[in-house]
Image (cartoon, coloured by chain):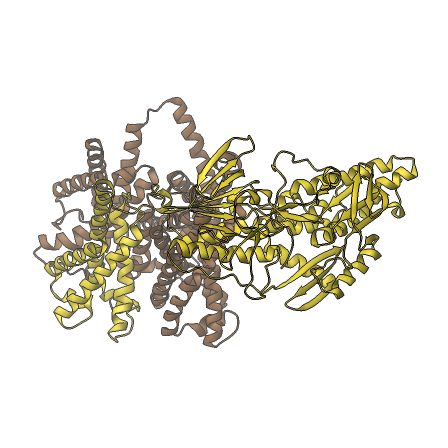
Chain colours: A brown, B yellow
Amino acid sequence: MPVRIGLGAVAGLVAGLIYGLLLSSQHMSPMMSPVDVPGDQITSLVLSLLVGVGFGLTFSRLATTAGAGLIWGIVFGVLWWVVGPLTLFPFVHGVRPDWAIASARAAFPLLVGLAVAYGAFMGLLYSVLTGLYQNRLTSQFVRRLALRVLAALLGGGLAGLFGGLAFGAWMAQAGFFPLVAGLVNSNSAETGRTLHLIISIAIGASYGVLFRRDIGRIGSSIAWGAVYGLIWWVLGPLTLMPWLLGQGVQWNIPAAQNAFASLIGHVIYGIVLGMAYAFLSQVWQTLFVDSDPLSREPEGPGTRNLRAIGVGAAASIVGGLVFTVVMVETNTLPKVANIVGMTTPLEGFVVHMVISILIGASYGLLFRREAVSPMSALFWGITYGLVWWFLGPLTLFPLLLGQPLQWSLDAALQVYPSLVGHLAYGAGLALVYPFLLRRFAAHTSTRHSSDGATEDNQASAPALWMLMLVLGLLLPLILMSTATV
Amino acid sequence: MGAVVGLLASLIATILGTIFIGSDIIRLLGGSASLLVAWAIHVLIGTLLGVGYALLAAQEIDGSETAIRGLVYGAAAWVLIVLVLIPVLTGEGARWQAAEAARQTPALIVYLIQGGLLAIACHWLFGLADNRLGILTLPSEEMPEVSIQQHVVILGGGFAGVSTAQHLERLLGDKRDVRITLVSQTNHLLFTPMLAEVTAGGVEAQHISPPLRAFFRRVQVIRGEPAAVNIAENTVTLKSSTHATQTLHYDHLVLALGATPQFFGNKNIETYAFTFKSLSDAIQIRNHVLEMLERADNEPNATRRKALLTFVVVGAGFAGSELIGGLNDFIRGSLWYYHHLRNEEISLILVHPGEHILPELSVELASYAQEKMEARGVTIWGSARVTDAAPSAVMIGDKTVPTETLIWTAGNTPNPIIGTIGCEMDKRGAVITDDKLLAKAQTNVWAVGDCAVIPDVVTGKNAPPTAQYALREAKTLAYNLNAVLHHREPKPFRHRSQGTLAVVGHQTACAEVFGMKFSGLFAWLMWRGIYLGKLPTLEKKVRVLLDWVIDVFFPRDIAYAPTVDGHEMSGVTTTSEEGV
């Protein structure tokens, strides 16, 4: 425990120092301090130290890998944003906190700074320090680590290429490539496209290196990817890109509003990256690492997967019916019917249920090993529903209707009720899924592990669930224009 | 526990909310203008959320990231309750438009606090209850053994015994004070309707024999054979394949021991005839038939070759008729491998004492079956009996037929162990039961299947010894056992036959289903469809289906099958006759 606190304090202090230097270089206030006076670095550093100790006391146990450290650091940053700037700091200023959206909007720069620039860095640094403390750097260890990192770099790079191609489709449509080309003093779309793919591959490679020990199956990797996309939205369009273009960091509401389309692009990029990386990783593991017959499950993989698909499809009927309520209330069913060239609500209902069943089947397949308990099944279901909010009404739905992609803040706010529907769908599906699966598990696995489900790589799942909800539920509300509220 | 924690968490969260941002937050949370009503609604919802969390989190008492789970739970609850439920119930309409949702963020913070507190408190209390007090229920598979009060022992691993155990296990559910033990001579259930297909090379032997352990969650399976039953002391003595003995005490005993072949005291027939009751029988007959073909192909003497190519099956019930139909296809279909043999040299003789084969079917269908078989080369000797047998000949009536192949399906008798138990029996040696399947004059000995005489209240006659009846009897017996174990009244056995099916040769069958008669290819497809559906376990269904598909494209395999001597202790099987 003292070591953890000590390492947490060091990580918090170093992160606070760098964070402070970064902000000073951008002529921004310290932001760690409740006293909003530029130059009050001592208070900021003391607070950084205390926050680091807090991290060491609470989440450090979970920061067992670089990826886990990063993600728990961000969660800690978000929580500190709620506890500090939204609750305690107003008291210091003699103001009663109101937890209203206007206050959250005013504190948006702090959210970005504390979550990504401070929290993520602190968590990452903490996990690196812990790794150095716990492992002796023998030549064998370094060689083995280097080989694994190389494999993760290659896999991540390839997965990043797939994600970059998906994101690039929108960038081409929005005429974004010349802007990217500006990073190398060019305005050529081709240069921008090439640069975009290089960046995508680099981010993908970093994804592999950071999360190689955290990523289990494709289902959870989708969430890891989406959250990593969110991180790179902050690091890219809001931080590095404007900085490199000489505009300084843009942690403000107008810049974030302007970059909202890019946020959806980053999330889609992350989803594709996560899926592709986990798929490649699984293929590699199965072919070359983990084909030991001793770990075989009582039934063949075909039966298990078919059952998971069937149970997911059956459970999705409940989720689909719950979602229908939202669709009826918001009169969306005729639009859904348009996908197949029909118009009536009844036809829309049939199309909606078919889509629901297909997504439910994919949930069963992708989260068979992740949904190890009723609670994890529920939260993965909600997360998967959220992922489909990005993929469905914001991306595939307009494409299927022959319209251009609608990756804008206005479009996202317009389909906010659909977000509630997607979350309810995911919850309904996931509440029924383990219940239906249990009768099979009781038959096949009373004396063995339950249907091969494993709790490996599940320790960081709550952090992912939370950040996904911040991304989907809260961010659009914070970024919506004051006129709308 | 969850309700109390939920109540306290909602109280603390609302108090914190009131301290920070005033009492308006309570009106927002409760959806009422009245502070008291809104507060009561919110606390009630909080209590229910606590119950929900406790139910969901019961298996996750070791979660170290508990507080974050709680925050996520709180956020999800905010969406469901604040954005949807409360406004809908108060008639405002849902608040799922972004602008409306944005106004509810103070409530989101309260729900986050509430969720976090709820999770931490549940985590702590569950840990306390589990580790210190030991009162938390563990998942069922980790449950420690409870004291067993009742023991049901089922003797026999055929349709009747296995089905009784399956139904009883399902009826008992998680009630663990009743123990079920199934004693079987083999570790698999033999699906006898397809046994003739094994002999004829249509399906692999293992594909019609699902392992017994695949059927059960908690039934204890013992591979053994009853050596003695003492109904006065409620004990069964078992002997295993190594002749070691084991004694079981029972509270209820189920006799599902099936039947063995009956030779009516003729030792020569018993010595020289093949029986057709088990997998090893089927494989031995197949190997013997192939051996006859191999030897005949290399036999220059026409008389001896003729004897080698003569196959006699005795008994024209389902087993004998289906077997000879299948053998006829197999032998004649394999001739192209044997270049010195001609179709005319092959002789398959079905001997039976009645006027018609397949007495279980109507005369019309039985005649159809007989015509089809004869047209395909089977010789049927009706009103005839096999009187004696020798290594190279069979006496049919007073006529001697040179052959080295005699297969006996003409008679069955209940397992001989039945006669030693002391229950009341009929002249065949079967246990007489009442209509509730309880052995006559006994209070805890039940009988089912071929080894029992069971009155059927529907027909007023005794239930026939078919698989169809055995399965229905087993279901009633399981119900009655469960009823008696719970001090309820058992019910009488009643079943109306759904019909019968029989294959008579290549793509030809006869069927009587619900009074309707079918024959030919349609009946054959019906036979395959129905029995494939009834074959236990999906895996075996798929394997048999693949065997049938392979059979469409490739010729019969004439390689000897590996013998299975020693794996079935006495060849006694249960319930061989067929029915839907």
- Percent x, y for residue A346? 47, 75
Question: Which quadrant is home to the C terminus of chain B?
Answer: bottom right
Q: Is residue A466 visible?
A: no
- Percent x, y for residue A197? 46, 47
- Image height check: is B51 above or below B214? below
Q: Is residue A135 left or right of residue B287?
A: left
Q: Is residue B78 left or right of residue A310?
A: left
**Residue in the image at 63% along x and 68% along y:** B514
Nearer the observer, A33 or B573: B573
Farthest residue toward the left?
A: A94
- Percent x, y for residue A445? 44, 45
State the image quarter where residue A278 is shown. top left
Nearer the observer, A29 or A68: A68
Q: Is residue B58 left or right of residue A94?
A: right
- Image height check: is A462 above or below B507? above
- Percent x, y for residue B265? 70, 42
- Image height check: is A13 above or below B8? above
Nearer the observer, B156 or A230: B156
Q: Is residue B412 left or right of residue A471?
A: right
**Residue in the image at 54% along x and 50% along y:** B424
Nearer the observer, A365 or A84: A365
Q: Is residue B366 visible?
A: yes
State the image quarter where residue A379 is shown. bottom left
